[in-house]
Amino acid sequence: MDLPADSLAAVSRKVERGERLSFEDGVLLYKTADLAAVGALANAACERRHGGVVTYNVNRHINYSNLCTDECMFCAFGKKRGEAGAYEFTMDDILARAAEAVSQGADELHMVGGLHPDLPYDFYPAMLAALKERFPALHLKCFTAVEIDYFASLTGWPVERVLADLIAHGLGSMPGGGAEVFSDRIQRKIFRTKIKYPRWFEIHAAAHRLGLKTNMTMLYGHIETAEEKVTHLIRGREAQDRSGGFLTFIPLLFHPENTALRKLPKARPIHSLREIAVARLMADNVPHVKTYWIMTGLETAQIALTFGADDIDGTVVEEKITHMAGAVTPEGVTESFLRALIADAGKTPRRRDTLYRPLAPPAAAAVAG
Ligand code: V47
């Protein structure tokens, strides 16, 4: 789209002065052909906040079951019992994966799953407690707001009580999934039966009141418009103004394969770079912007580190949600690989824990990285 260069220059002056960008500014950042300028602006904003440091974490994702009562058109992960590809891990399977994660030096488990049709609520606090009993140092980042809402319906409890119970059993923070796009139109079209976005915000606000930190995501590359994405970013930053508990914004690249939306083309790296840059510039009060290499691929994630991302997830090890939707990325990488990837992008790698406190890398990685 041809837009007057002086309007991008005006946005640039606002960013330099630390002024909040408007809806129109956000739309311009999406529509200008000058992606390089948008990227440079986002990189400068990122460096002002974080210097040249890019953080990563040594984690393991565990998607404990994909049985799901919901049916979202963008999802290839959720299955009905008996359907090809349906699976569920036992407590022993989960503990074995956690033991492997600890032996590989991980400090975080990122655990999410489908809305299981018949597991009782008690399974989830028991799972947290069993993990904490054996691996007390592991941070448990678990359950999307959609799952928390489901637990509230299983128990009949208010979400505060569900969250307080999970915290008492070891929950350390919540990931940002299940947000998709904060838009009624998109919800009606592709995730009709899922919780609506005000409920997503309500659950995160409750988590923040109880002292949990959480993340926020946005699923891009399907039927959404630039205007809807800017609205998502503005709704997100307004929620952050109210509660302050969001650590990280993560744009998630939609993978169409094996989903009801498989006819849609997959967005390209150039789109992923713009999502990172616009998130950095619009979500000005969320400290971190993460590139999730599992979805974008490692090459795009590396370039994203110069387009406004200050964080990369992670060593991961095993991932189902994107790989069941056709991802061809590996399911995990080593810490030394991540450090080299960050250093090659001209940034300084720093290992962090889930709450972004610096952690010492292993001696060998420190020498190499
Ligand atoms: O909630 C589902 C999305 C999310 C597809 O908080 C899909 O640090 C792409 O939330 N193509 C799960 N995406 C992943 C997630 C996440 C990942 C990494 C870090 C963090 C964090 C959070 O993936 C789901 C949904 O929004 N998703 N299906 C698909 N076909």
Image (tube, rainbow, N blue to C red):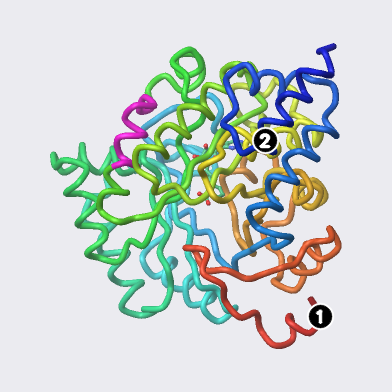
Q: SS for tag 1?
A: helix
Could you classify mark 1 by the number of other residues whose Cα lies within 10 Å: few (under 14), some (14-19), or many (20 or more)?
few
In the image, the residue with mark 1 has its CB under 8 Å from the nearest atom of ligand 1: no
How far apart are the two marked residues, 2 and 1, measured between alpha carbons? 36 Å
Query: In the rendered view of the protein, which quadrant contains the N terminus?
Result: top right
At x 47% / y 25%, what residue is drawn? 182
Magenta-highlighted stretch: main secondary structure?
Answer: helix
Q: Position of residue 106 (x, y in %)?
A: 55, 73
* Label drawn at residue 368: 1
Q: Position of residue 165 (x, y in %)?
A: 20, 57
Which segment did they paint magenta?
A: 194-205
Q: Is residue 103 above or below residue 86?
A: below
Quarter containing ligand 1? top right
Q: Is residue 213 above or below residue 191?
A: below
> Badges 2 and 1: C-beta atoms under 8 Å apart?
no
Q: Position of residue 91 (x, y in %)?
A: 36, 66
Left or right position of 187 against 280: left
The amino acid marked with disc number 1 is Ala
Q: Nearer the viewer, residue 171 or 40?
A: 40
Left or right position of 154 against 115: left
What residue did someone put label 2 on? 15
At x 72% / y 68%, what residue is drawn? 349
Q: Position of residue 225 (x, y in %)?
A: 63, 16
